Image (tube, rainbow, N blue to C red):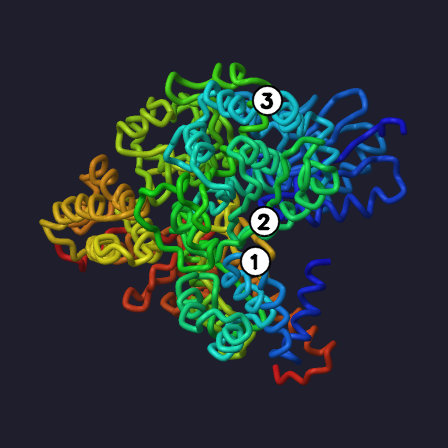
Amino acid sequence: MEHKNMNNLKISAKEQPLFAIMEIVQRHQAEQGPAIPILQDIQSAFGYVSPQMLERASEFSGIPVSELYSIVTFYAQFRMEPIGENLIQVCHGTACHLAGAEKITESLQFETKASAGGTSPDGKFSLEKVACLGCCSLAPVITLNEETNGRLTPDKIKKIVKETRKLSAKNAEAMGVCTDA
Amino acid sequence: MPEPEYRVKVGLATCGIAGGAAKVYARFQDALKGSAVSLERTGCIGMCYNEPLVEVLEAGGKRYLYGKLTPDDALRIVEEHLKQGRPVIDLLLLGEGCTPGEETFLDKQKRILLKNCGLIDPENIESYTAIGGYEGLRAALTAMTPGEVIEEIRRSGLRGRGGAGFPTHTKWRLTREAAGVQKYIICNADEGDPGAFMDRSILESDTHSVLEGMLIAGYAIGASAGYVYIRAEYPLAIRRLKLAISQAEASGFLGERILGSDFSFKVFIREGAGAFVCGEETALLMSIEGKRGMPRFRPPFPAQKGLFGSPTSINNVETLANVPRIMHQGAEAYSSLGTEESKGTKVFALAGKIRRGGLIEIPMGTTINKIVFEIGGGISTGKPFKAVQTGGPSGGCIPASLGDTPVDYESLKKIGAIMGSGGLLVMDEETCMVDVAKYFLTFTKDESCGKCTFCRAGTNQMHKILERITQGEGREEDVQILVDLAEKIKSGSLCGLGQTAPNPVLTTIQFFRDEYEAHVREKYCPAKKCKALIEYKIDRDSCTGCTLCARQCPTGAISGTKKEAHSIQLSACIRCGLCINSCKFEAILISSNPKVKA
């Protein structure tokens, strides 16, 4: 249910960015200390927070742009660049580190052609290293678009990336988008 | 309604889902359509190493626990157990007919706090009230004054479970006594320590108990509102918390004039935006106020001047989840467990190189050896046990030789480690202690907020030195510099992050100095982990020329013809280990790198 709402918001946000930001600010305006929830909602609507969005949010909320900028650059959650079609977060918690998170990151980089913290040239994958996803007994762990996958090996990574590529090609086809792949 | 003949409970917390439990649940749902079997969801059963877990309860009271299930196994359980009444023995972990062994994981524990986890449906408030949920709140509101609630908590001996172990009743009393009309209670669910997932599991599996704890705390200190500050990385916990809040409101446990008393209380959720330092209480306050999470001076303590300038008590998830139990069962029952100074139980997230990793709960004072060998079943790799790490980036490494140390606040402090929030990482011979220290410093240097120079610059310097040691470029004086820097960072930092960041380095130097010296003097990594100090070689006698490794190698460093021994071109090898994983004949060996001169 919640997911569906988010998707609806996504579409309206992309079509009507100004309106979407205004609506988000209004939703949180009555709260004390609303800056972070506002920015979080903007990111979940657009996938990232651009300098232009900060300016709009500042106009509507009255919070200085500098303050919003200071928050976005302080907290790891915020991205200032758009992300690829699929977001992969690689857990680098202690248990995953011991279980070979580095190898998992390396094989993901190899398979997706995205660098850690970057997006692949074809725009299909973004790769992020994160602190701990809290699934230590299933280390090493990644999340693919919020779905957690555990007990990984480089082999399984290969399979996951392949399947994701297939799925995203299928989705693109279903939406009638021409792909050159 | 008659009791169903069978109830099937699927563990659907994040680790279960990561292990594939959602697919197992869906398969049960399909297969049980139209049947009288009651299919239920529950939280974390604790045996994370056996996920996905499913429990079958028979009307007669018999219980069967199945583990490591695939969707197809679910069909077998439906066909054989639920339809024909024959438990599927080969999938069985616990219950009549199972192979003995697994029961020690649970039998050696003392599950008070985790009692409901894996038993109730966290998304259903009736499932919680049916086993005495919200009775602690009712007892407090109808029969006790706030002062009496605080006294009860004092007698229980409850101390903060976030790591520092500050007495909970003192925090509450100070907040209660502070002047101010508006007061707040904050539930700190910003579980940032890598390797710790106790709070996530409790929030996902027994959500209402945390809310109930917040309500009792709110009543005790005279607060009318509470915030849960929770990591955004825990989407399932957030979703269940939102659901629990709306259910509690609908049932009259939350809102205006709760249970007919004069006490009114609201709960808000704030999602953390990914900053480790926000687990520190003053940084957490800044974050809720919508600013950069940077710690400030204390005093004034949050109990006097906290959130939005009002008196605030900040308590950890596990601390709050203990509160309803104490109110419901009484302080004596609680304080009868544990040691003189550390009462009750502690939940640990047991992970690392351990056979049975998962969520465990033990009485305070249980020894490390008992946790590792009796509950955890020993080392997963079969290699010798080397150390445990408690307290994450703020804690220390405890060597196997100190395995008799009881786990309580004082004993751990004495040997340079800390209780911490509950991460317990087990390490074997293959773990390089210098690499572990470097790992934690990589984390703390990135997470330092930058306010205090020693923390900001000092952790970076320490990391640089550790980096150079693992690269084989360590200098004789490096270990001493690390110790000096550590002392300065500890005394020159404002908050817990900086004050404890050097602990992993200090304890590894204290207990594993020889490993540092081997890296520095002999350019040798005893655990064969540090990439610059090792090289890969193919054993020509064992290699069958199956070509699997050559196909796996990302840099094309392996060459050879089919059915003939292969070889590795060392200049191209990045020592990623993909070839070792792929080799079925153990033909790829690691040796010290002769090029790095001692």
The residue positioned 58% from the left and 72% from the top of the image is A46
In the picture, measured across the screen, residue A177 lies left or right of residue B418, that is right
Q: Amino acid at mark 3?
A: Met
**Residues at discs 2 and 3 both on one chain:** yes
Residue B45 visible in the current orientation: no
B411 w.r.t. A178: above or below:
above
Q: Earlier in the sequence, mark 2 or mark 3?
A: 3
B570 w.r.t. B24: above or below:
below
- x and y percentages locating residue B392 in the rendered image: 37, 42
Mark 2 surroundings: few (<14), some (14-19) or many (≥20) residues within 10 A: few
Task: Determine the CA span between mark 1 and mark 2.
Answer: 10 Å
Q: Which residue is mark 3?
A: B144
As helix, strand or loop, the secondary structure at mark 1 comes to loop
The residue positioned 47% from the left and 22% from the top of the image is B344
Q: Which mark is residue B418?
A: none
Chain bearing mark 1 = A
Q: Which residue is mark 1?
A: A31
- x and y percentages locating residue B71 in the rendered image: 72, 46
Q: Looking at the image, which is closer to me, B286 or A176?
A: B286
Q: Amino acid at mark 1?
A: Glu
Task: Determine the CA span between mark 2 and mark 3.
Answer: 26 Å
The residue positioned 51% from the left and 31% from the top of the image is B360
Q: Which residue is mark 2?
A: B268
Labelled pair 1, 2 in contact (Cβ < 8 Å): yes
As helix, strand or loop, the secondary structure at mark 2 comes to strand
Q: Looking at the image, which is closer to me, A108 or A75?
A: A75
Chain bearing mark 3 = B
Task: Determine the CA span between mark 3 and mark 1.
Answer: 33 Å
- x and y percentages locating residue B92 in the rendered image: 67, 30
